[in-house]
Image: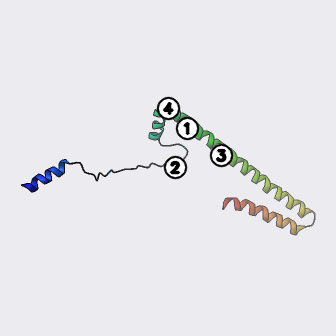
Amino acid sequence: MEEKNQLQDQSKSPTTNNTHQLIAVQHSFSGPIPPPDVLNDYERIEKGLASRIVNMAEKQSGHRQNIESRYIRSANLRSIRWVVCRGIFSHSGKQCHGDIIFFRAIGNNYSRFFK
């Protein structure tokens, strides 16, 4: 009987060894625009915030496409210059120099595709 009373007394007394459990949740996504549920959370924080995030991603995409198209145009012009130089050297009787320039131009074109 005493043993039963001791157990009851222990269960009523506060324990000094309290443990807490922490659960962390991590969400990740790929791309400039978060998933719709995350966009809704942003919209709840501040009205119009989700549309600003989407607009920012659209501007960034347009900027990146502009840079890529400028790079391609400049690479094409560089290749054309090499081919023109080959033609000039070939017609001036320096076929060896013309061939070196021609193969360098071809190498520049192919190296862009195999990076």
Counting from the top left corner in percent of width and height, residue 23 is at 37, 50
Q: Residue at x 31, y 52 (%)?
A: 19
Q: In this view, does 49 lie above or below 32?
A: above
Q: Quadrant of residue 56?
A: top right
Mark earlier in primary sequence (2, 1): 2
Q: What crowding class fits label 4: few (fewer than 14 Cα within 10 Å), some (14-19), or many (20 or more)?
A: few
Q: Looking at the image, is 98 positioned above or below residue 30?
A: below
Question: Which residue type does callout 4 highlight?
Answer: Glu
Task: Looking at the image, tell me whether mark 3 or mark 1 is earlier in sequence order.
Answer: 1
Instruction: Name the mark on residue 54.
Output: 1
Q: Give the residue number, with chain letter if any, for mark 3.
A: 64
Provide residue 50's location: percent of width, then percent of height.
51, 35
Query: Looking at the image, do the residues carrying marks 4 and 1 touch, with CB atoms under 8 Å apart?
Result: no
Amino acid type, callout 1: Val
Residue 29: x and y, percent?
A: 49, 48
Question: Residue lying farthest right?
Answer: 92
- What's the CA distance linking mark 3 and mark 1? 15 Å
- Residue at figure coordinates x 79%, y 65% from the top left: 103
Q: Residues within 10 Å of mark 2 (few under 14, many from 20)?
A: few
Instruction: Report how far apart the C-alphas of labels 2 and 4 lie in the structure.
Output: 23 Å
Q: How far apart are marks 4 and 3 (CA)?
A: 28 Å
Question: Mark 2 sits on what residue?
Answer: 30
Callout 2 secondary element? loop
Look at label 2 and name its amino acid. Answer: Ser
Disc 3 residue type (three-letter)? Arg
Q: N-terminal of the two: label 3 or label 2?
A: 2
Taking the spot 65% from the left edge, 46% from the top edge, the residue there is 64
